[in-house]
Every structure is written in C-alpha cells, then in structure tokens.
Image (spheres, grey):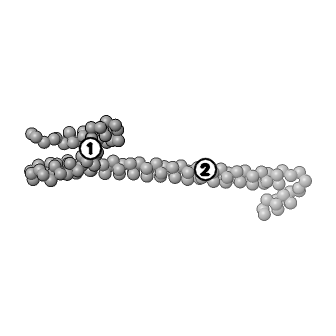
Amino acid sequence: MGRFTLKWRQAATIASDVMADTLYARYYDVPTASGVATARRLNLAQSSPECRSPALLAFGAERLVGVVDGLVDLFDKLLADTNAKARTRLAEYHQAVATAANDKVLLLAQIVRVLLDPDLDDDTRMAATRR
C-alpha cells in the first residue's frame, strides 16, 4: 500500500508516449516517458532490498520483450530480403533457361534447312551435318 503497482507504471509510460507534445500534456505538465523512467529508477533506488528484486525482474522482463521485438523485426527484414534475392535469382535462372532453349531451337532450324535443302546432294548434306 502507498506504492504504485507495475501495471500503473506501464500504463503511465504508455499514456505519456501517446500524449507527448500535445496541448493537454503541456497544460497539465504530463511527464515524458524518460521522466517516468527516471522516476522509476529513483523509486527503485529508494525501495527496500526485498522490493527491488521483483521490480528488477519486471524491468528485465520489460527490456527482454523490447529486445525480442527488435530481433523479430530484424529476422523479418532478413527473411524478406532473402526472399527478394531468391526471387531475383530464380527469374535470372528462368531467363537463362529460356535463352538456352531459344538457341537450341535456332540451331535446330539451321540443321533442318541444311537437311531439307533440295539443291544439295546427299554427300554434301552428310558432310555439312558432320562438321
């Protein structure tokens, strides 16, 4: 009794972030999130050792959530970047396969022209195909 709970502190931090730089915050002198954090540190320093451990654990848990959120964001960006690179490489591979198939069709067209040329006799045609 006589102390604010952790839930109230978290609500005060969120409210100060939401209301920062508003007319209401300036008029009623609402503390900023950094001011709330400073008050939290002062309150922790003034509290008895029995009360510090739960507060430190709560602070550590809060920090852990922030770190995990940051890591998840970084992993998401990495995954999106890797996916984009893979899609680009796949498109380049498909383009290379299409170019190779086109070259094969053009070569086959030249071979067919030589084989079906009525002006060539069989010996010349066979010599041209073996080159």
Which amino acid does the dot numbered 2 rest on? Answer: His
- Residue 130 numbered tag: none
* Location of residue 19 with respect to 126 vertically, above or below: above
98 vs 15: above or below: below
What residue is rendered at 39% in x and 51% in y?
A: 74
Say left or right for 12 vs 70: left
Q: Closer to the camera, 42 or 7? A: 42
The N terminus lies in quadrant: top left
Quarter where residue 130 is shown: bottom right
Counting other residues with Cα less than 10 Å from the Cα at mark 1, is it few (<14), some (14-19), or many (20 or more)? some
Direction right: furthest residue = 119
Work out which residue is located at the far top of the displayed protein and give it.
24
Q: Where is mark 1, residue-wise?
A: 31
Q: Secondary structure at mark 1?
A: loop
| Front-lying residue, 32 or 114 | 32
Please name the residue that numbered disc 2 is placed on.
94
Element at label 2: helix
Coordinates of residue 17 in the picture (x, y in percent)? 31, 42
Along the line of sight, which residue is nearer the eye, 83 or 97?
83
Q: Position of residue 101 (x, y in %)?
A: 67, 51
Q: Is residue 77 visible?
A: yes
Q: Up-down: is 13 above or below 78?
A: above
Residue 82: percent from left, percent from top: 47, 52
Mark 2, Cα crowd under 10 Å, few <14 / some 14-19 / many 20+, is: few
- Between the residue at mark 1 and the residue at mark 2, the CA separation in whole angstroms equals 59 Å
Is residue 19 found left or right of 119 in the rendered image?
A: left
Q: Residue at x 12, y 52 (%)?
A: 46
Q: Residue at x 88, y 56 (%)?
A: 120
